[in-house]
Structure formats: C-alpha cells, structure tokens
Image: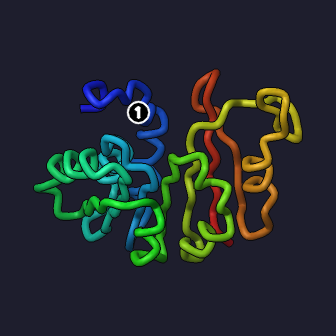
Amino acid sequence: MSRRRGFITSTRSETGRLLATLAASRTGTLAELGTGCGVGSAWLSSGAPKGAHIVTAELDPGLSKDVQGIFHDAENVEVTCGDWTVLEQYAPFSLLFVDVRDVMASIDVLADLLEPGGIAVLDDFVPSPFWPPIVDGQVDTVREQWLTDERFAAVEMLIDPDASLIIATRR
C-alpha cells in the first residue's frame, strides 16, 4: 500500500527494527504521530508485549480508513483519524514515535505526553558533523532543542549515512 499511495520512503527497516526493540521493553500505551501507511505502527506492534496498546493518528481520512483495514484483526492497534492532537486523550505514553517534522518542534506538548521514563523516537533527521547541528546552511533548532532539554536524556543515532534519529527518555 505504501508505494500505491506514493509513500516511497516509509519507515526505514533500521528504524523499524529499533522501534520493535524499544516496544518490546514497554508496557502501557505506545503511540505514533504520523501514521502514513501504518509501517511504523506495524513495527511497534511486532515488538510490543502482550497487553500493550498502540494508538496512531492519521490526518487523511482515506488513508486512515485504509490503515484501519490493515489492522482490523490486530487487537492491540487503534488507528484514529485526525491530526496528532487527537492522541492527547490516550496519554501518557511509554513510547512515542514522532514521524512528523513540524510536530517535533512542539517539545513542551510532546514532553507532557510522555510518562516518566517514557521514550520519544524522532525520525527523519539529516546527519550533521557540526555542533550546533547545521542543515542546509542553518542551525537545526529542533534537533538542538531535543538534545539539550533538561527534561530528557537524549542521543542522536545514525541509522544510515544519510539519516539519523533522536531517542529521548523523559527524566
């Protein structure tokens, strides 16, 4: 479905394996912001222990309906239609996968969605050998903010020569 819908670059396998691994260590509610075709949610579901609940939000009603069909038989996955704020009602989250760049800038709201010890995984960064991180000739303030915020222990992880992500654990 990803290719048919034009999602040529869905969640990378490296990111997916990381999500499944992290999900295996979590209980409670796990969430994905930016469902797309459901690839990230599938990875979360593949690793999540029995009893964990996964909720994801997709803005596009048609795409949301298609993804609901994919997870129709999955008891632990709930696909909602709406922007990412519809997930606030399911918080706090033990794991939060954020795959929407504009949402990553809302660090205060996202921090409040995580339980203490909760993990945020933020995808789709371009590696930078500089500090502060420079992308396209400008400081990547979103990345800088996540890596320096006192509410988190955070690390940037290179997953491919042209891609990195941030893992941030709520203190």
- Kindly identify the residue that appears in the image at 70 percent across and 55 percent down: 154
**Tag 1: amino acid:** Ser
Q: Position of residue 124 (x, y in %)?
A: 58, 37
Answer with left or right where residue 10 lies relative to residue 144: left
Rendered position, 52 above or below 61:
below
Rendered position, 13 above or below 87:
above
- Kindly identify the residue that appears in the image at 47 percent across and 43 percent down: 18
- The colouring scheme, among rainbow, by chain, secondary structure or one colour, is rainbow
The residue sitting at the top extreme is: 161
- Tell me the quarter of the image containing the N terminus: top left
- Tell me the quarter of the image containing the C terminus: bottom right
- Kindly identify the residue that appears in the image at 20 percent across and 53 percent down: 68
Name the residue carrying label 1: 10
Rendered position, 140 above or below 111:
above
Q: Which quarter of the figure has residue 137?
A: top right
- Kindly identify the residue that appears in the image at 42 percent across and 69 percent down: 87
Q: Position of residue 126 (x, y in %)?
A: 67, 31
Give SS at disc 1: loop
Q: Position of residue 159 (x, y in %)?
A: 58, 31
Q: Name the residue nearer the viewer: 47 or 58.
A: 58
The residue sitting at the front extreme is: 61
Q: Residues within 10 Å of mark 1 (few under 14, many from 20)?
A: some
Q: Name the residue nearer the viewer: 65 or 152.
A: 65
Q: Position of residue 72 (x, y in %)?
A: 13, 55
Answer with left or right where residue 73 lies relative to residue 125: left
